[in-house]
Image (cartoon, rainbow, N blue to C red):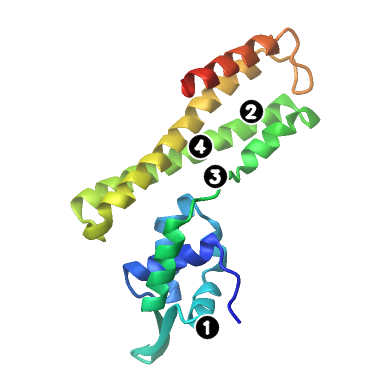
Amino acid sequence: MTTRRTPTTYAILGLLNVQSWTTYELAKQVQRSLSWFWPRAERKLYDEPKRLVADGLATATKETTGKRPRTVYGITDAGRDELRRWLDAPPAPPTTEFEGLVKLFFAEAGSLEQLTTTLDAIATEATERIDVLRGRADAAIDEPRFPGRQHVSTVCLRLALDQEVAVLRWVGWVREQVAQWPDAADPGAWDGDRVLAELAADARAAVG
C-alpha cells in the first residue's frame, strides 16, 4: 500500500536525488539546509526513507564501516520520476511557525517586561541565524559542497537571509511602538488607527 506523500516525502526524495545518504548524514544535511524553511523534515527523516523504500522510490543498502553497520539510502528511477511530477505541481501557500510571535499575539495577558524579553530573544535568535547564514555563504564561496546545484541553494539562501533581516527590522519597529504603551494590556494614547493606515498603505505599495 502506498503511503501518503507529503512535502516532507519529497524533501527527503530531493536530498536523495543529490546523492545517497545514511539517516545520520541526512539529518546533518537537513540541519544545514531544509531546516531553514521546512523544519518538519528533521522530525520525520528517520521514518521517511523507509517509507520511500517500501514505495519503490528509494533503495536501502546495508554496509559496514569498520565493525559498525549502516544503511545507505539512494533514489530509484521511479523516485526521480515522482520527484519531477511533484515539481510540476503548484506549491501550497507558505506557512509560518514562530513561537515568539504567538507570545506577542497574547502579550496583553502578561507584562511589558515579558513582552520586551520576548522581543530580545527574537532579536538574538535572528542575529545568530544571520551569522550562521553568513558563514554558509562564505563556506560556499570557498569550498562549495555541491557545485552543480549551488545556483538553486544560493537563491534559497537569499530569502532565508532576507527573512531574518526583516525580523530584526520588525523588532526595532515593535520596540518603538511598545515604548509608547503604559503596559501590555493598555496602549494608552498610542494611535493604533494611524499605524493601521500606514500598514494598509505599505501593503498597497508592495503590490503596486
The reply to whether residue 75 is visible in this rendering is: no
**Is label 4 or label 3 in front?**
3
Rate crowding at label 4 as few (under 14), some (14 to 19) or many (20 or more) other CA atoms within 10 Å. Answer: few
Residue topped by disc 1: 54
**What's the amino acid at mark 1?**
Ala
Q: Earlier in the sequence, mark 4 or mark 3?
A: 3
Q: Earlier in the sequence, mark 1 or mark 3?
A: 1
**Is label 2 or label 3 in front?**
3
Q: Residue 171: x and y, percent?
A: 55, 27
Q: Earlier in the sequence, mark 1 or mark 4?
A: 1
Depth order, front residue of 187/111: 187
Rate crowding at label 1 as few (under 14), some (14 to 19) or many (20 or more) other CA atoms within 10 Å. Answer: some
Label pair 1/3, CB-CB below 8 angstroms: no
* Quadrant where the image shows the N terminus: bottom right
How far apart are the alpha carbons under marks 1 and 3?
29 Å
How far apart are the alpha carbons under marks 1 and 4?
43 Å
Residue topped by disc 2: 116
**Is label 1 or label 2 in front?**
1
**What's the amino acid at mark 4?**
Thr
Up-down relation of residue 91 to residue 101 (above or below): below
Residue topped by disc 4: 124
Q: Residue 59: x and y, percent?
A: 41, 83
Q: Earlier in the sequence, mark 1 or mark 2?
A: 1
**What's the amino acid at mark 3?**
Pro
How far apart are the alpha carbons under marks 2 and 3?
28 Å
**What's the amino acid at mark 2?**
Thr
Rate crowding at label 2 as few (under 14), some (14 to 19) or many (20 or more) other CA atoms within 10 Å. Answer: some
Up-down relation of residue 206 to residue 105 (above or below): above
Depth order, front residue of 132/94: 94
Q: Residue 116: x and y, percent?
A: 64, 28
Residue extending furthest toward the left: 142
